[in-house]
Image: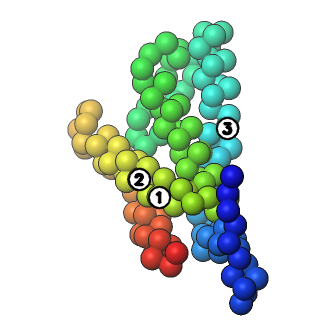
Amino acid sequence: MEVVLENRETGTSKKEYRKALVPTWIKVFGWIFIVMGALVPFFYLTSLFFGFSASYMMFGLEYEGPAFALMPLSISTIILINGICAYGLLFGKEWGLNACLVFGYIGLFITIATMFIGSGLVIRLEPIIQIPYLIKLHKIKAHR
């Protein structure tokens, strides 16, 4: 159960205020992650039960093949958690901003780690979005 507090001066709820602080570019990426997070369990389980080969990729982690391995489960879990975090942020849940901050840093760490692990240094473009995203989330947190 969620308690909705209303600002008597503006007539807006705290939940609506939290939602209004999120810029459009984060909302677009958020909806992409919500859709991906909603679909990934279906695709992963389909691949798992029917033996389909699939490609999994997120934050520089990549896997192609059947779902009978730890890597596709890990990548699918990361995508699912990103979808849950995006839902919390876009729908103004109290836990949404903190969840996005925590998982945003985890995603940035994974991306940077994958740049150095493997066959030489690989420059990834994800931090170009991840770093401004984290900065904006910190600015939003300061206004709450």
CA gap between label 2 and label 1 equals 6 Å
Q: Residue at x 60, y 74 (%)?
A: 21
Q: Nearer the viewer, residue 28 or 64?
A: 28
Q: Position of residue 42 (x, y in %)?
A: 68, 26
Q: Residue at x 47, y 58 (%)?
A: 98
CA gap between label 3 and label 1 equals 21 Å
The residue indicated by pointer 3 is 38
Dot 2 amino acid type:
Val
The answer to whether marks 2 and 1 mark residues whose Cβ atoms lie closer than 8 Å is yes
Q: Position of residue 19 (x, y in %)?
A: 65, 68
Residue 118 figure quarter:
top left
Q: Secondary structure at mark 3?
A: helix
Instruction: Choose the circle earlier in sequence order: 3 or 2.
Output: 3
The residue indicated by pointer 1 is 98
* Tally of numbered discs: 3
Q: Secondary structure at mark 1?
A: helix
Q: Is residue 13 left or right of residue 52?
A: right
Question: What number is the disc on residue 141?
Answer: none
Dot 1 amino acid type:
Asn
Q: Position of residue 6 (x, y in %)?
A: 71, 76
Characterize the local packing of mark 1: few (<14), some (14-19) or many (20 or more) Cα atoms within 10 angstroms: some
